[in-house]
Image (tube, rainbow, N blue to C red):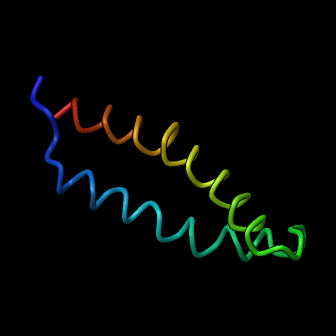
Amino acid sequence: MKAPNKHLIALINYLALVPLVYFIPAWLQPYLPENKLLQVSIIVAIIVPIISYIVMPLTMKRLNKK
């Protein structure tokens, strides 16, 4: 099994992160505390698992099929 291209993985990460970073803070803003550090911590705690446990495993599975 050949390792996927690092540049392709970086591009997929970028394309997955842009909408998450754009939309999640806006959606959660009414429910978040005023403290900016706490806001960022909560948002990152949501985005990182989405990328790590959903996007990347699906991507790797798809790339390994080819």
- Residue 25, x across and y down, in percent: 70, 72
Residue 4 appears left or right of 44: left
Q: Residue at x 79, y 68 (%)?
A: 28
Residue 27 appears left or right of 63: right
> In front: 35, or 57?
35
Q: Residue at x 56, y 65 (%)?
A: 20
* Residue lying farthest to the top in this orientation: 1
> In front: 32, or 2?
32
Note whether 30 is above or below 46 in the view shown: below
In which quadrant of the rendered view does residue 30 lie?
A: bottom right
Residue 12 appears left or right of 1: right
Count the numbered circles shown. 0
- Residue 58, x across and y down, in percent: 41, 37
Note whether 16 is above or below 64 in the view shown: below
In which quadrant of the rendered view does residue 59 lie?
A: top left
Q: Residue at x 23, y 38 (%)?
A: 63
Quadrant of the drawing holding the N terminus = top left
- Residue 8, x across and y down, in percent: 20, 54
Quadrant of the drawing holding the C terminus = top left
- Residue 31, x across and y down, in percent: 90, 68
Residue 64 appears left or right of 25: left
Q: Residue at x 52, y 36 (%)?
A: 53
* Residue lying farthest to the left in this orientation: 2
